Amino acid sequence: MKRVLLGISGGIAAYKSAELVRLLRKNDYEVRVVMTHAATQFITPLTLQALSGHAVHTQLLDANEENAMGHINLARWADLFLIAPASANCMAKLSLGLADDLLSTLYLAAECPVYIAPAMNQAMWNKPVTQENLNRLKQHKVNVIGPEAGSQACGEVGYGRMTEPSDVLAQLKTLNAPQLLLNKKILISAGPTREALDPVRYITNRSSGKMGYALAQQAQLLGAEVTLVSGPVQLTAPNNTHILHVESAAEMYAVILQQVAGQDIFISAAAVADYTPDNVQTEKIKKQGNNTQLSLCKTQDIVASVANLTNKPFTVGFAAETHNLEQYALDKLQRKNLDMIAANWVGHAEGGFDSAYNALQVYWQNGQKTFTMTDKTQLASQLLTLIAERLDA
Ligand code: C5P
């Protein structure tokens, strides 16, 4: 768990800090809040106390607060110090090293990474002195999140809106993630495939693509360069991902074999159809009789094809099973020549296809690891950490 010291300075965007605290806690960060006097005019310490679960710090020279946790200890306690919103005045003070209140004193005392999310009127943001202060803070290794452009509380339009709390959190995670896959190229397949029968019908499966998309997002956080080959899903691609959309197993095969050269890792999270109609009818198939039959032929096995290339990447397959999980997974590991296989139960009440949650049993040559039921984002991060370890080994 990371400990975040959240500094709130005085500005209308202080109302966003309440949501930020809620999101940070939801994402397993422990949060302590420090507010300037001006910030308390915009949002009450009681609100932040209720959301953070701890008394809010506002005074530098207050015996009670110093007894609870002195300001130096508070600075030492933090793994990271986030100041959101950071007003023009707050930025000016920090850039000069002034320490006339608790927040600015904590900035001087903090040895952990510091992040600021500026928020102010667009003219104040554009003022040369504010830009000079910003540059000075950057030179002092302060990480700056935002601000964004748009309409402002004062009715003006321009740069100065505080970045939305969910984006602040996403950027914090990116900037803090250990770069386990830095400079690694990773190819990921996701989602189901659609095998056309005729112009209006197709065969598909229940895959939502959530696992593959979570892997793409988390790989990016770990510093990898990601290419995502996606079957048809209702998801938005993570930022900065090179995404290629496909429909059928044959298209996925062609795109992946075209993209695989130079990749360090391939994760085949897609639920690729094993069989596809022999012939796609060019006209809609007419209803006839009480029974009908479909003639299907086997698709090419993408992951096995990649795993048998001479310069193959570290190749990871998935195995979704309703029974004999270990036996089937180990069999696929050998038969498809994989470096690793992540097996999960499907067709049960919890987890698996279409769910936001899953559990995985991972096997490789002479090793295995269990990841218990958790959300797919967390699971993706755990699996990628294991892949990075195995890649090093
Ligand atoms: O043999 P099975 O389909 O259960 O194996 C699942 C693994 O094989 C998954 O990683 C899936 O992406 C991959 N696969 C494939 N090409 C196919 C069928 C499955 O890459 N035609």
Image: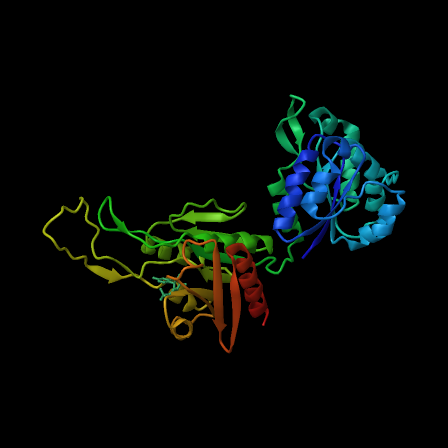
* Residue 65 drawn at (x, y percent): 84, 46
Question: Residue visible at 69% across and 46% down?
Answer: 52
Position of the N terminus by quadrant: bottom right
At horizontal 74% and vertical 26% (from top left) the residue drawn is: 124
Q: Is residue 4 left or right of residue 22?
A: right
Residue 342 can be seen in this image:
yes
Asked whether 294 or 154 is in front, the reply is 154
Q: Is residue 378 left or right of residue 67?
A: left
48 above or below 225? above
Q: Is residue 158 above or below residue 193?
A: above
Q: Is residue 276 left or right of residue 376?
A: left
Give coordinates of residue 299: x percent, y percent: 30, 61
Marks counted in the figure total 0
Extreme top residue here?
155
Quadrant (top left, top right, bottom left, bottom right) of the C terminus: bottom right
| Residue 146 visible here | no
Which corner quadrant of the figure contains ligand 1? bottom left
Q: Position of residue 163 (x, y in %)?
A: 64, 37
Q: Is residue 22 left or right of residue 297?
A: right
The one of 151 and 354 positioned closer to us in this rendering: 354
Residue at x 44% of width, y 54% of height: 355
For this rendering, which residue is in front, 235 or 267? 235
Q: Position of residue 178 (x, y in %)?
A: 65, 58
